[in-house]
Amino acid sequence: MPVLDLPLDPCYSPPMAFHLTLKPGRERSVVQRHPWLFESAIGNLSAQPPDGAVVDVRGSDGTWLARGTWSGKSQIRVRLWTWNIEEHIDAGLIQQRIATAIAGRQAIAADAGTTAYRLVFSESDGLPGVIADRYGDFVVVQLSTIGAALRAQAIVEALVAQLAPRGIYERSDAEVRAKEGLEPAERLLWGEGVDGPIEILENGQRYSIDLVGGHKTGAYLDQRTNRRRVAAYCAGADVLSCFSYTGGFELEAAAAGAQHITAIDSSAEVLALAAENARRNGVTTPIEHVTGNVFGELRRFRAEGRTFDVIVLDPPKFVHSRNQIDRATRGYKDINLLAMQLLRPGGILATFSCSGLVSADLFQKVVFGAAVDAKRDVQILERLTQAPDHPVLLTFPEAEYLKGLLCRVAGSTSD
Ligand code: SAH
C-alpha cells in the first residue's frame, strides 16, 4: 500500500508555543465556542506563528479561552479546535474526533441500501477544514484549511485505522483553498487507486460515481434525504428535474412511479452518467435528457406551452462571496418564476439553494417574489435542509448551507 509523502508529521507541532490576546470586548464569540476567529479580533501575538501552527487564544485579561490553528493568509485567522486547556491538537485528538464522527453515522452505516455518505463534516464534527466522504470501500477527503492540510498524515492514519478502506483520495476544492493560500490538491493519499467510476448505493439505488473527475467529492450526498422527500410527490407525475447532475432526483422519482421525466443539465457528460444510472437501475419510466442551459430551456418550454406536475430546481452554488448575493438572487428568482409558470395548477415545486451566504429567510423572500410575479398562490409544504450526515453545530450555524422549499403551486391568482 503506498503511503504518499505527506507534508508533515502527524502531530505538527512547531518548536514554539504561540499565543494571542484578543482585543477587549472580542471574547464573546470565542467563549460561545464559535470556531472562527477573524483577524480584526486579535489584539496582539506572542510571535508570528507559521501557517498551520497551534495558537492559544487568551481573553484581553489574559485568561486562557481556546486553542486553534493559524491561517496567516485567510481572513479567518484562527480555526478553533478546542476550548479545553488539557486537549492538544495532535494525532490523538484527530483520532478521537474522527471516531466520534463515524459513531454519529452509525444509523446510516447500518442501512445496507446506502453506501455513500459524509463521515466527517468539518467544524460540525470538531475538525475544522476536514471533510471525509465514504463511497463504498473508498474515502474521499477534502482538506480546505492549512491547519487541516498540514495534518493530512494524522487524518489519513485515523481513517485507515477506523475504516480500513481500499483507498483514500484527496479532492481538495480549489476555491476555498485559494483563500488559505493553498494549491488545489487532487491525489491518491493512501491505498489503491480507482481507474474508472465505481458503483455506490444510495437509498437502494445504484449510482456510478466518478471519484476522480466528478463534482465535489464525486456526488451531492447532501441531497440524499431530499431526493426521497420529493419522490413522495412523484407517483404518476410528469416530472422536470433541473440541474440533474447524475440524476439522483430522477432515479427516486422513477422508483416512486413517475410517469415521465425530463432532466436538464448543461453538461452532456454528466447526463450520459445520469442515463447510465437509469439503465443500471432498470428504470422503465421514460427519461428525456436535455443538454442545455436551464435559464434558456425553461423559457423554451414556456414558449412551447409545456407543463409539468413536479419541478425540481437544484442549481449549483450561485454565491461565492457577498458581492454576488444580488446577482444570485436575481438568478434564483428567474428560475423559480419560470418553474411556477410551467407548473400545472396544484403542481409541486422543490426549490433549493446551496449558497451558504443566502439565508433561508432571504431564499424564502426570493421565492415569494417569484410567486407574486407569477401570480400564483404558493404553499410551503416542507422545509428541507442538508442530510443528517451534514450536521449543523448549534455554535456554528454557518454549517447550514443547503435549504429547500417544497411547495404546492396553485392555479393563477387572477383565475
Ligand atoms: N441535482 C443534482 C445536483 C446538481 S449540481 C443531484 O441531485 O445530484 C448542479 C448541476 O448543474 C451540475 O451538474 C452542472 O453541470 C449543472 N449546471 C450548472 N449551471 C447550469 C445551467 N445554467 N444550466 C444547466 N445546468 C447547469
Image (spheres, rainbow, N blue to C red):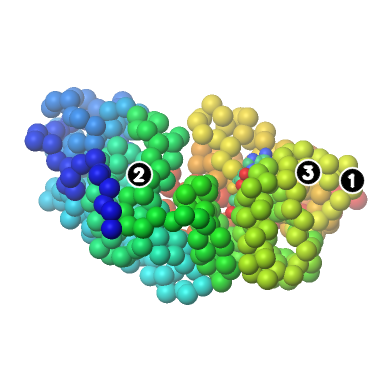
The residue indicated by pointer 2 is 143
Left/right placement of residue 339 relative to residue 358 reads right
Is the residue under label 1 in contact with that under label 3 (CB below 8 Å)? no
Q: Are marks 2 and 3 in contact (CB under 8 Å)?
A: no
User: In terms of image quadrants, where is residue 108?
Assistant: bottom left
For the residue marked with disc 3, what is the amino acid? Answer: Leu
Viewer-nearest of labels 2 and 3?
2
- Which amino acid type corresponds to the residue marked 1 in the rendered image? Glu
Report, in whole angstroms, how far the alpha carbon at label 3 lies from the one at label 1. 10 Å
Position in image of residue 195 (x %, y %): 47, 55
Residue position marked by numbered label 1 in the rendering: 304
Specify whether residue 49 is in view: yes
Lower sequence index among marks 2 and 1 = 2
Q: Is residue 392 above or below residue 335?
A: below
Q: Quadrant of the N terminus?
A: bottom left
Q: Residue at x 24, y 32 (%)?
A: 51
* Mark 2 closeness class: few <14, some 14–19, many ≥20 residues within 10 Å: many
Q: How many marks?
A: 3
Gap in angstroms between the C-alphas marked 2 and 1: 46 Å
Where does label 3 land, which residue?
Answer: 298
Residue 300 lies in quadrant: top right
Dot 1: within a 10 Å radius of its alpha carbon, few (fewer than 14), some, or many (20 or more) residues? few
Give amino acid for label 2.
Answer: Leu
Seen from the viewer's position, the closer of residues 43 and 123 is 123
Q: Secondary structure at mark 3?
A: helix
Mark linked to residue 31: none
Q: Percent from the top left, x then y, of residue 190?
A: 31, 54
Picture residue at 80% right of the left edge, 53% below the top = 343
Give left or right: position of 291 versus 111.
Answer: right
Indicate left or right for 125 with 412 as reference.
left
Residue at (32% x, 45% y) in the render: 128
